[in-house]
Image (tube, rainbow, N blue to C red):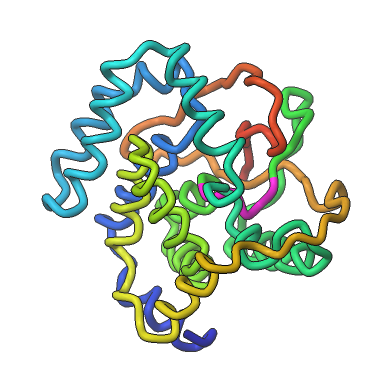
Amino acid sequence: MNRVARAAAARRVASRESAVVQRLAALLLEYPTRDLLDLLPTMTAAAEGLPAHLRVPLEGTLDHLRTHDLGELEAAYVTTFDLARRRSLYLTYYAYGDTRKRGVALVEFKQAYRAAGFTMATSEDLPDGELPDHLCVVLEFGSSGDERAQEAALRLLLAHRAGLELLRLGLLEAGSPWAGPLVAVCATLPPLDGDERAAVARLAAEGPPGEEVGLQPFAPPSYMPDSTSHPFPRPSSQPSRQPSTQPSTKRRARR
């Protein structure tokens, strides 16, 4: 799907329903914290207004978070996302791995955020920063209540559809309770065409490129505005997690 087709598709699928799915998915894919678990009743109520094909996958993850101890959830999250190369939450990783080309792709994410009026926020609380291609960043951006932001987020998801679908398939194959948000998000997007299916199959067979380079210059704090249009607030804090090969998911931004 080329740039023009992605823009047209984003306009077609943008809706309040898809924004609610994005917001729920962004929260459910966060590293689990007590603040996040405290939001479960509100998230459950928001999911109840969705059609079954979107609600049911989300409810599976909500139920899992509700019925497991926080320590178990933290350990399982790290194993699921931080220690598995094909279950990364960083969208450009699937297309570029840790190669030099990934730096250009990360700039495109930052440019999309700025074009919609979202600016980088810095804070002493966020020493690690966050890469702008983190799936939760993109989903929060798209669910901010701003029409331009939603369409821009959808264009980013469509541009990295192969990686998004591979993440969905990887979580389903692993029997992960975090598969539900990916299933719901992908269900809000247009059906895969032939070229996209081929791209997913190729990526599944070959995996991301393997050249490793330093990407420290491309690791700023990411973008997420405070907005009263959200159906519910996001967790206010996140403690340090176990050491991993990926940055922390702590994020803040402003408009």
User: From the viewer's perspective, is 30 left or right of 66?
Assistant: right
Q: Residue furthest left?
A: 52
Q: Is residue 17 above or below residue 65?
A: below
Query: Where does the image place residue 46, in percent across and percent down from the top left?
Result: 22, 37
User: What residue is rendered at 61% in x and 34% in y?
Assistant: 249
Query: Where does the image place residue 156, in percent across and percent down from the top left?
Result: 53, 67
The answer to which of 185 and 20 lies nearer the viewer is 185
User: What residue is rendered at 52% in x and 74% in y?
Assistant: 202
Q: Is residue 243 above or below residue 53?
A: above
The answer to which of 28 and 194 lies nearer the viewer is 194
User: From the viewer's perspective, is 211 left or right of 71?
Assistant: right
Query: Where does the image place residue 220, in percent across and percent down from the top left?
Result: 77, 45
User: From the viewer's perspective, is 249 left or right of 148?
Assistant: right
User: What residue is rendered at 47% in x and 68% in y?
Assistant: 161
Q: Is residue 150 above or below residue 179?
A: below
Q: To which quarter of the image does residue 224 belong? A: top right
Q: To which quarter of the image does residue 59 belong? A: top left
- Residue 206 in magenta? no
How many numbered badges does the structure rendering display? 0
User: From the viewer's perspective, is 34 left or right of 78?
Assistant: left
Query: Where does the image place residue 95, in percent across and percent down from the top left?
Result: 63, 67
| Magenta highlight: main SS | loop
Q: To which quarter of the image does residue 39 belong? A: top left
The answer to which of 74 and 170 lies nearer the viewer is 170
User: What residue is rendered at 37% in x and 11% in y?
Assistant: 69
Which region shows up in magenta?
131-135
Q: Residue furthest front?
A: 205
